[in-house]
Image (tube, rainbow, N blue to C red):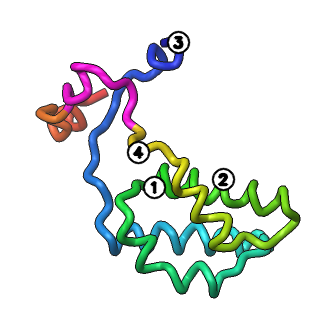
Amino acid sequence: MSFGSRIQVALPYPAPDPASRRRIWQNFLNVLVSEDERVDLDGITARMEDLARREMNGWQIRNAITTARRLAASEKAAIAWAHLEPAISVVPETTRFPHNEHDNVLTDFDFDSFLAVER
């Protein structure tokens, strides 16, 4: 619980839609390419519609990419669908923390009033 005690505000946000997920996947792949990471871009891009349909948020997508990157590095291979597919299967289904009765405490919070307060 020591990690939970450091979280002061949890902001709810809507899950990304398929078009947003497609952009998130593409952005992460572009970063890998820009860092001269070996990536089977054609093979992964061919499955982009499948990736966009999976209900994942940006944190989960990032973790899947990171896991696939490590799997590929352990084989001294380019990051490919063969690394990404199992990586997706081990990403946690949820990223909200903590999971308790207070999870929805900010759903009715008036952020506009909060931001309008002079500091």
- Image location (x, y in percent) of residue 35: 76, 69
Residue 105 within the magenta-colored segment of the rendering: yes
Tag nearer the camera, 2 or 3: 2
Label 1, on which residue? 58
Nearest the camera: 76 or 4?
Answer: 76
Q: CA distance from mark 2 to mark 3?
A: 26 Å
Secondary structure of residue under mark 3: loop
Q: Is residue 111 above or below residue 9?
A: below
Q: Is residue 95 above or below residue 48?
A: above
The kind of residue tagged 3 is Ser
The earlier-in-sequence mark between 3 and 1 is: 3
Question: How many C-alpha atoms fall within 10 Å of the one at disc 4: few (<14), some, or many (≥20)?
Answer: few
The earlier-in-sequence mark between 1 and 2 is: 1
| Residue displayed at 35% across by 27% down | 9
Label 3, on which residue? 2
| Residue displayed at 72% across by 70% down | 79
In the image, is 100 to the left or to the right of 105? right
The earlier-in-sequence mark between 4 and 3 is: 3
Q: CA distance from mark 3 to mark 1?
A: 25 Å
Q: CA distance from mark 4 to mark 3?
A: 22 Å
Q: Which residues are magenta?
A: 96-106
- Image location (x, y in percent) of residue 24: 47, 67
Label 2, on which residue? 67
The kind of residue tagged 2 is Thr
In the image, is 113 to the left or to the right of 32? left
- Image location (x, y in percent) of residue 75: 85, 62
Secondary structure of residue under mark 4: loop
Question: How many C-alpha atoms fall within 10 Å of the one at disc 1: few (<14), some, or many (≥20)?
Answer: some
The kind of residue tagged 1 is Gly
Label 4, on which residue? 93
Nearest the camera: 98 or 106?
Answer: 98
